[in-house]
Image (cartoon, helix red, strand yellow):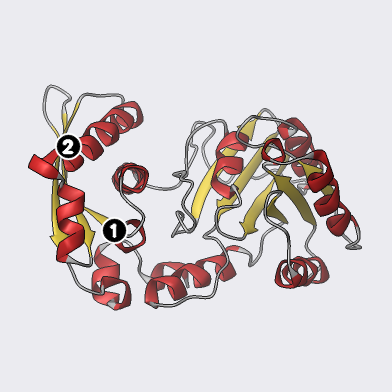
Amino acid sequence: MKSGFVAIIGRPNAGKSTLMNALVGEKVSIVSWRPQTTRNKIVGIMTEDDVQVVFVDTPGIHSPKNELGRYMMKSVRTATEGVDLVVFVADAGREMDKRDLELLKKHVDSGVPVIAVLNKIDEVTREKTFAELSKLNDISGLASVIPVSALKGKNMDAVKSEIIRLMPTSDVRYYPDDMITDKSIRFMSAEIIREKALRCLSDEVPHGIGVEIRAFSERDDGIVDIVADIVCEKDSHKGIIIGKGGSMLKKIGTYARQDIEILVDAQVFLKLFVKVKEEWRDDTEVMKELGYDKKNID
């Protein structure tokens, strides 16, 4: 059989999480149109009869402006260490610049096989797709260059086949066959809540929010009770998150509960609260409380 580890890297909002979810066949990593949605390394596991591929979805590569940003970039660096393959994802609608190409060349020169995936081709003209593909094809040493639409499923079979081809032969399965991620249900529930907040809230709020699960328990009848805090940085943001008469918080909670019920396959009672912790993205202690502990990615 074949098995190995694959790091998925690229700039923010290139569609890395959508790509991984499509390959795994399940929603493992939260998805949003907002950049820098992914903050942690998220593991997704694809297992078939004679293949197991462990994907590591990473935060978008950017210049960090706070401790959370530095944590995210450390996640990217550690995710690419010791992997068997790197999948570089680029957005077809956003012209690749010198930094993108240099980053790609750096990984090619490291000796690890690299697949370049040009994503979101359904959103641009053929001429634009061809122009970006030409840049990628000019980089020598790439294992392959594949244009796709991860959202629409276009050319995803080609990506999957190429990944499997490049996996090393091994008699090791790293995870049980029915496991799709190494993250806990508690962690996944917090990410679902954050995803719904990202989708519902106005532009000035999302990057400054985090979610902490304060209580997670199951009753004798199987109902799951969850109490969670949505943490923001300003009192003005708190009012936006709560909304008039609690309408926004209720909306976020309803959407989150629906997805969490699918995750746990049970009825869920979800209570959400909003807390203000000023400048928490530069407070390492609060970051730890919210699941962003640098020790976990060393």
Would you say residue 16 is visible in this rendering? yes
Local crowd at mark 1 within 10 Å, few (<14), some, or many (≥20)? many
What amino acid does circle 2 point to?
Answer: Lys
The residue at which mark 1 appears reads as: 210
Q: Is residue 49 above or below residue 186?
A: above
Total marks drawn?
Answer: 2
Q: Nearer the viewer, mark 2 or mark 1?
A: 2
The secondary structure type at the circle numbered 2 is helix
Q: Specify the quadrant of the image occupied by residue 291.
A: bottom left
Give the CA separation, mark 2 to mark 1: 17 Å
Q: Which residue is mark 2?
A: 250
Residue 227 percent location from the top left of the image: 14, 45
Residue 35's disc number: none
| Left or right: 15 as drawn, with respect to 101 | left
Q: Nearer the viewer, residue 43 or 58?
A: 58
Q: Residue at x 30, y 30 (%)?
A: 264
SS class, disc 1? strand
Q: Is residue 130 left or right of residue 88?
A: right
Residue drawn at point x = 65 percent, y = 45 percent? 172
- Residue 27, percent from left and from top: 48, 35
Q: Amino acid at mark 1?
A: Gly
Q: Position of residue 128 (x, y in %)?
A: 79, 47
State the image quarter where residue 189 is shown.
Answer: top left
Pick the front one: 19 or 90: 90
Residue located 23% across and 32% down the image? 254
Could you tell me residue 200's position as x and y percent?
Answer: 32, 42
Q: Out of 274 and 293, give the one closest to the viewer.
A: 274
